[in-house]
Image (cartoon, rainbow, N blue to C red):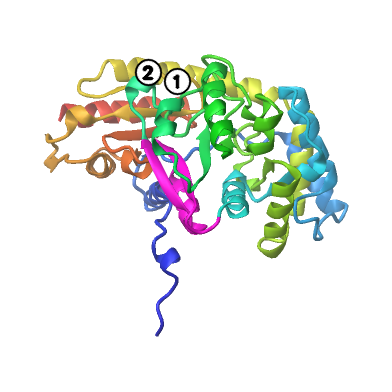
Amino acid sequence: MKPISSIAKGIAPSATVAVDTLAKQMKADGIDVIGFGAGEPDFPTPDSIKVAAIKAISDNQTRYTPAAGIVPLRNAICQWMKREYGVDYQPSQICVSSGAKHNVFIALQAICNPGDEVILPAPYWVTYEESIKMTGGVPVVINTTEQTRFKVTPEMLEQVITPKTKALILTNPSNPTGMLYSKQELEAIAQVVLKHDLYVISDEIYDKLVYVGEFTCFATLGEEIKQRTITINGASKSFAMTGWRIGFAAANEEISKAMANYLSHSTGNPCSVSQYAALEAYSTQEDLLTKMQLAYARRRKYFLERIKKLKDVSCLEPDGAFYIFMNIKGLLGRTIQGVTINSSADFAQALLEKGLVAVVPGEAFGAPGYVRWSYATSMENIREGLDRLEKFLSE
């Protein structure tokens, strides 16, 4: 039998999905595990959005739609982008697909040729590296540190740019670190982008979850930057619509057309009912955002207070999103509950087996020596999970 695709064999499964799936399976098996792996709001989708979906079904809005999404939704997204950030797009420049993750993949397909290099600052979201490889592109990883607050600098970019460099992936606020780039920092990066004529895939899915500082949409930094930027966003985080699978990309006409062509030959179109639900979200929903922001801010504060009291672990204070990126380098080489901790993967495995707490090891994000916690879960789970961490470390 002939071998399968070499590209397919080189793609690793999503570590965050794997951890979340394992935690859910353990709970189904009657094991009292607490999961901190998934970046999924624990709030229900607002009733008005659910009502809009039910109405769409009743009105028989269940047929094929344009590959890039229904025009009313794309128009609502344009109005939302204008209202929130003052940036102008036409509906033809918006591609709606099955989640922001899908849009990252399609954006890379639209701009990359095999062998093109894509700069990827680490720590990075687990899917970025695999999506680059799926296009035949080459990930060029820049290892950032706590000293730069896990943010890439213009100097770092200059050191890795080659004639093969096609694009930079920027996530702001960051998953997994929660760090936020200031406008001044983004402007400095933009100068490098223009100098070397690069594309930027700017993943801004956590734009509404900021606690320290002010978010800046990368495409607002000037018309030349806007033409080179593919903005990725979606309904999952801001409107508690993860399972509805609606994300969007905003780009110039050439890129958006290419992305729509890819969509037309792959998924065809995102779920029609989900699109009408998202239309309601982008047209009217604001109350849920305020409620979630306040809840996440409280959870974040509590998390930081608890971690400060623990020995041999630490974390930077995140500016946004809903993650704590915990430094466990002080534990490496130690034996905890009979398990020698040589890596963050060892730590995560031991914490799951011995402490019944599921976190994601830093290796999945290109950052060994760290683990990611999601505080998109109840305060009750956070308290119990940190109690279990404290007990695990003390033994």
Residue type indicated by callout 2: Leu
Residue type indicated by callout 1: Arg
Q: Pick whichever, 160 or 68, lies toward us.
A: 160
Give the side of residue 191 with respect to residue 282, left or right: left
In the orientation shown, which residue stands out farthest toward the right? 59
Dot 1 corresponds to which residue?
Answer: 300
Dot 2 corresponds to which residue?
Answer: 304
| Residue 239 painted magenta | no
Give the side of residue 208 with respect to residue 344, left or right: right
Which region is colored magenta?
A: 113-142
Mark 1 is surrounded, within 10 Å at the Cα level, by few (under 14), some (14 to 19) or many (20 or more) other residues, namely many
Q: Quadrant of the C terminus?
A: top left
Q: Alpha-carbon distance for marks 1 and 2? A: 6 Å
Dot 1 lies on which element? helix
| Residue 135 painted magenta | yes
Q: Quadrant of the N terminus?
A: bottom left
Dot 2 lies on which element? helix
Q: Is residue 39 visible?
A: yes
Circles 1 and 2, Cβ within 8 Å, touching? The answer is: yes
Q: Residue at x 88, y 52 (%)?
A: 59
Q: Is residue 42 visible?
A: no
Give the side of residue 300 with respect to residue 306, left or right: right
